[in-house]
Amino acid sequence: QVTLVESGGGLVQVGGSLRLSCAASEIPFSNFYMGWLRQPPGKGRELVAAIKSSDSSTYYGDSMKGRFTISRDTVKNTVYLQMTMLKPEDTAVYYCVVRRSSLSTWNYWGQGTQVTVSS
């Protein structure tokens, strides 16, 4: 079982920045993706960003490219999401997620952290 604990959400003004953190317990498989999904109010979930354990390749949702950066500290087993130039449409619950590289479904989820961008 993998436990994911998110932190860093909150209220920020348009154009501001915020950094989310996700600390993972030991992940019992060697090849995986770790990342973030989000769910805006009244909408479905979408990929924000993900990072691959084997080579640290990164992936972003289209609307996040150039504004968000995902990174990983392998010693602390923690992934970070640096968000800049935030927009009201970035308002959402952000979930830290993990999945095996061989699967298409996210196996493990954090409890979620609220990010609200006010105009």
Image: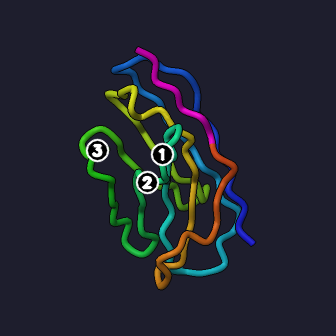
Observer-nearest of 74 and 36: 36
Q: Which residues are magenta?
A: 113-119
For residue 72, side relative to residue 76 (left or right)? left
Circle 1 SS class: loop
Image coordinates for residue 29, horizontal then vertical, percent:
60, 81
What is the crowding at mark 3: few (fewer than 14 residues within 10 Å), some, or many (at least 20)? few
Q: Which residue is mark 2?
A: 46
Mark 1: amino acid:
Lys
The amino acid pointed to by label 3 is Ser
Q: Secondary structure at mark 3?
A: helix
Residue 64, x across and y down, in percent: 31, 44
Q: Earlier in the sequence, mark 2 or mark 3?
A: 2
Query: How busy is the neighbourhood of tag 1: few (under 14 within 10 Å), some, or many (20 plus)?
Result: few
Q: Are marks 2 and 3 in contact (CB under 8 Å)?
A: no
What x and y, as percent, mark residue 116? 52, 27
Give the Cα distance between marks 1 and 3. 15 Å
